[in-house]
């Protein structure tokens, strides 16, 4: 039996050595793959940085005029409660606009008057400088109004 036990011990040692060599090969393969991944990540990051450098427009900022007033952001992130309050406020505002008698008579004229009242005067000066272009668009608007009013009258009959 000693001969058979020696054969059994020898086979078990060989199996163990095969397993160990297999595990070392797997470990080496995993480490080499991880190394390749880090190298490729570094290459991707360097490419991105090069692209960002190509699109760097900070040198042009010295030639641009400074904004007069910083823009105010309302809320960067809306949570559920603030979104609901905003919806309630806006729906009430929309209802008030729709109930406005001037808006009911002529919506485009009401919107135009509102824009004239709320826009800064610099924009109004630019509109005056436009000249004929504004008149042409007003003529088109009046044509549209005439066309839509005749259609709505035909539908009422």
Image (spheres, rainbow, N blue to C red):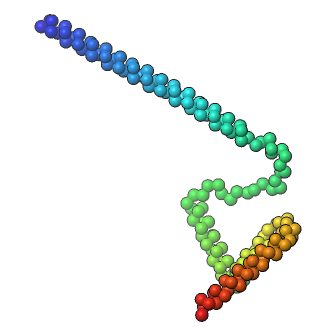
In the drawing, does residue 144 fall left or right of residue 35? right
Q: Nearer the viewer, residue 153 or 117?
A: 153
Placement of the N terminus among the 4 image quadrants: top left
Residue shown at 49%/27% (left/top)?
34
Question: Can residue 74 be spotted in the picture?
Answer: yes
Residue shown at 54%/28% (left/top)?
38
Q: Nearer the viewer, residue 107 or 94?
A: 107
Residue shown at 15%/6% (left/top)?
3
Q: Where is residue 73 in the image (x, y as percent from the top left)?
A: 70, 57
User: Residue 145: which quarter of the image?
Assistant: bottom right
In the drawing, does residue 78 fall left or right of residue 126? left
Q: Where is residue 40 in the image (x, y as percent from the top left)?
A: 55, 30
Q: Is residue 57 above or below residue 31?
A: below
Placement of the C terminus among the 4 image quadrants: bottom right
Residue shown at 63%/32% (left/top)?
46
State the count of labels. 0
Question: Can residue 113 be spotted in the picture?
Answer: no
In the drawing, does residue 124 fall left or right of residue 99? right
Q: Position of residue 51 (x, y in %)?
A: 67, 38
Q: Is residue 94 above or below residue 39?
A: below
Q: Where is residue 49 in the image (x, y as percent from the top left)?
A: 66, 35
């Amino acid at each position: 039996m000693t001969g058979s036990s020696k054969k059994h011990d020898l086979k078990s040692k060989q199996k163990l050595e095969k397993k160990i060599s297999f595990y070392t090969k797997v470990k080496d393969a995993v480490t080499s793959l991880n190394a390749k991944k880090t190298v490729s990540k570094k290459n991707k990051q360097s490419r991105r940085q090069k692209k960002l450098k190509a699109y760097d427009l900070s040198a042009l900022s010295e030639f641009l005029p400074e904004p007069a007033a910083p823009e105010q952001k309302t809320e960067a992130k809306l949570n559920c409660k603030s979104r609901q309050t905003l919806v309630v406020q806006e729906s009430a505002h929309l209802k008030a606009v729709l109930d406005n008698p001037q808006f009911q008579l002529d919506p485009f004229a009401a919107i135009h008057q509102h824009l004239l009242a709320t826009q800064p005067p610099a924009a109004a000066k630019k509109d005056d400088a436009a000249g004929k272009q504004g008149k042409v668009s007003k003529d088109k608007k009046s044509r549209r109004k005439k066309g839509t009013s005749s259609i709505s009258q035909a539908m009422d009959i």
